Amino acid sequence: MRAFTIRSIDLHTVLLPYLTPFETSFGAETDKVAVLVELTTDAGAVGWGECSIELWPGYGHETAETAVHMLKEFMAPAAVGASVSDPRAFPALIKRFRGNQHTRAGLEAAVWDAFARTNAMRLTDCFAHYAPAGHESEGRATVGVSIGIQPSLEATVEAARARLQQGYGRIKLKIKRGWDLEVARAVRAEFPDILLMLDANSDYEPADAERLTELDQFDLLMIEQPLSYDDIYQHGQLQKRLKTRICLDESVKSASDLRIALQVGALGILNLKPARVGGFSESLEIYRICAEHDLPLWIGGMLETGVGRAANIAFAALPAVNLPSDISATDRYFAADISEPPFVLGAGSTLTVPDGCGIGVEVQRDRLEEAKQRWLEKYPYRRAS
Ligand code: OSB
Ligand code: MG
């Protein structure tokens, strides 16, 4: 593998309006905000990464402002001038700055993209190169769609129907306390045979266990993150009472968390979000543990722009990612994405990895400038980055 030296790092804070607002147990979001990392190598190759964040620190602690601060003041200065011969060694360079997983993941993603481009490889093949022996990229990822909390049960059923008609083979419904049994019942009654799952985004308490056991009747693929975002132990207690498999999202922030979760029986499935665990190097370690334990695995999403989504698809194309990932086609999110080509849903509810080197999509400079402008106009008190 060819090495490179990091010459410069530029940051772009962008705002892209969603086609429809996305509501979870912690609120509704109307726009995607992302900090995009543009990394230039000594040879002039450019790698892109996305810090997956949201306008409001609901899912994770980070915001666009904290990401820019951490990158500008600390992480970028530690990275510029460094030589990269193995991307898995990059996290050590910024290890002394703790936390800020989504931010470090964005920077590390730019390193991976630059590395793959330097070696004239698709990023997906680059991931496969560092995966266990025999784990070649399948070149495409099986995906589903995540449906936010809707104004009514009828609207939820219609939203599911529309996505199924588009070809999505797995439906995930966001739930919260007071919006759970009825919504599962309504959608299951209309579509008795589909792959259906729920995501609570940590809205429940251990005392809700009784009510959660009632969800067992709906033949769900899994229930995602019912309890607190920082809990592992209570999920283990809850799993003993539920037939439905628990999938952890928020609670697993590292390979170490996953080992603890396996030890206490807190999960039957893992949602791996590369951003949540601090990047693709940690993701590869988590991937290895899942493969070793036969733990079903899929890749989660944060409604990323094309930059973040392309990298997630590259990872989701690895063979031990064996359940549909939360990565949908471009037209599920935006009228016009920041990059080209768009991702289009293919046969069998799949997204295909593009042929090009690295993440395989190209950032469109005019749309980038527009989206940066939109951020400044909508949030005029923000600094330009
Ligand atoms: O919990 O999986 C989640 C989006 C933002 C924050 C948290 C979550 C989500 C999603 C979106 O479910 C999935 C996607 O990117 O399509
Ligand atoms: Mg989730």
Image (cartoon, rainbow, N blue to C red):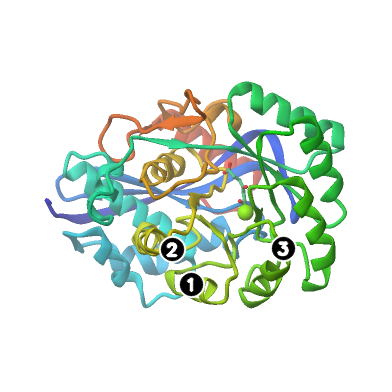
Q: Is residue 44 visible?
A: no
Crowding near the residue tagged with mark 1, few <14, some 14–19, many ≥20 C-alpha atoms within 10 Å: some
Which residue lies under the disc numbered 2? 278
**Residue occupying image coordinates x 72% and y 26%:** 161
Q: Amino acid at mark 2?
A: Gly
Left or right, 166 with respect to 67, comes to: right
SS class, disc 3: loop
Crowding near the residue tagged with mark 3, few <14, some 14–19, many ≥20 C-alpha atoms within 10 Å: some
SS class, disc 2: loop
**Residue occupying image coordinates x 86% and y 45%:** 182
| Mark 1 → mark 3, Cα distance in angstroms | 32 Å
User: Quarter of the picture for ligand 2?
Assistant: bottom right
Which labelled disc corresponds to residue 242?
3
| Mark 2 → mark 3, Cα distance in angstroms | 30 Å
Q: Amino acid at mark 1?
A: Gly
Which residue lies under the disc numbered 1? 99
Q: Position of residue 211 (x, y in %)?
A: 84, 61
